[in-house]
Amino acid sequence: MTTALESETGDLAGSTGFVVALDGFTGPLDLLLHLVREEQIDIADIPVARIADQFLAAIHAFGLNQAADYLEMAGRLIRLKVQLLLPRHGDDGEWIDPRAELVRRLLEYQQIKEIARELARLAERRALRHGRGYLPPPPDLPPVPLTVDLVELLIAVERVVMAIPQPVLHRVITRPLDVEGAVWRIQALLAERNEFDWRAAFGPKPTMVEVLSTLLALLELARRGVCRVRQVTPFAPLVIAREQALPALATA
Amino acid sequence: MSKLSPLSQLLEAALFAANRPLTLDELEGLEPDAAAAEVRTALDELREHYDFDGHAIEIAELAGGYQILTRAVFAMAVERAQAFQRQPRLSAATLETLATIAYRQPVGRAEIEEIRGVNAGGVLRTLQERGLIEVVGRGEALGRPLLYGTTALFLETLGLNDLADLPRAEELTIALQPHRAEADEGDDTALASVEEG
């Protein structure tokens, strides 16, 4: 008799085995009870030999010989049958009916079955009366697999995007520098004078573009050796002078 | 038609809006000036109002609380009106297991299996998932097995106020005897000696 122990360890291992529910029988005791009822015999005085044979025949017929629960009961019945066939020794005073345990279990199980039917009736009666919204508190179901629809996903994306700091953006507008025009203007001035303030190279209200164009033209002309650029003191205006080696009106 | 007292009206509002049983404590907390006895009287007043003035609802006492429920005769109408889908019925095996736990709690898996003669793992999980039973502790036996008991939802599902309202508790002689707790191991050895005898 190690069933109790085995199921304990089974409990620890989280194993469930498999449950056979066939033709409305919820287990070997259920089947046994059914056979006893069909025979219309007293549970307390079971003809073990006959019932054991019927039980075996039933589980063969149902193809249940793989079900451990039923097999265990079959084994128990056969053992009981053998015990009852053996001649008794000594006084009958010490003799305990080997069927006692089985009878107790059957009676117990019969009661459980009756209670189960009563509970089912109660539950059905209760189910006819509805509470507000008649939603029972949700049972603790295992977490459902994650499901996300498109809208939720987009909302989530928006939240992430919102969390990103706004980048500082600049609009870039191309303003072509007129280096050629500036070169022309400087050369024209150089043709007239040996030396002049660079501010003369652009108009009275120069734009940044004009200043830059002039500066680039100046550097270009200095590179070519057309003019020299001087600065007397730091931050003083540049002075543009004609390169001595070159005659006036030299064309680049 | 009688007119309800202000306290009864307040309780009616709270119960009407609630989708679960409210306990007496919760109801008392709604009106600090009212004594517990007054709340009880007001509840009785409300119950009588529903019962005798022709109402389709009633005050039910469930799992230690109070809830307004529609009367059973209107079940069809309510279900149709709300396109209500009934919870699937519990199977015979599940009900037997539930009955065993209800009358024997706290009870371990080994004892349940001993009574029913079958492996109970899958059924126990189903009952736990449906919120009808829960683990209430661990036993003293080898391996400190989990002990199961019924939940408040079990009482609500069966329309009971208290475990003492379980049917036929006094008639059930064998299955209900609490001898099991200490006889667990003794039982097996007794059987073993019978088998060897």
Image: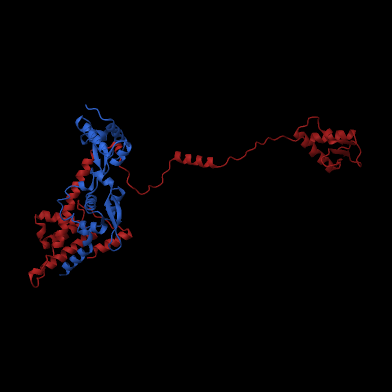
Chain colours: A red, B blue
Residue at the image position 48 percent from the left and 41 percent from the top: A156
Front residue of this view, candidates A74 and A45: A45
In the picture provided, is B31 more to the left or to the right than A208?
left
Q: Quadrant of the N terminus of chain A?
A: bottom left
Residue B130 position within the rendered picture, expressed as x and y whole percent measured from the top left: 30, 47
In the picture provided, is B188 more to the left or to the right than A236?
left
Q: Quadrant of the C terminus of chain A?
A: top right
Residue at the image position 86 percent from the left and 42 percent from the top: A225
Q: Quadrant of residue B190?
A: bottom left
Give the answer, above or below, for where A105 lies relative to B91.
below
Residue B10 position within the rendered picture, expressed as x and y whole percent measured from the top left: 30, 33
Front residue of this view, candidates A233 and A38: A233
In the picture provided, is A165 more to the left or to the right than B122?
right
Q: In this view of the protein, can residue B8 be seen by the observer? A: yes
Q: Quadrant of residue B186?
A: bottom left
Residue A43 position within the rendered picture, expressed as x and y whole percent measured from the top left: 11, 57
Residue A230 position within the rendered picture, expressed as x and y whole percent measured from the top left: 86, 41
Give the answer, above or below, for where B94 lies relative to A240.
below
Q: In this view of the protein, can residue A130 be seen by the observer? A: no
Front residue of this view, candidates A93 and B79: A93
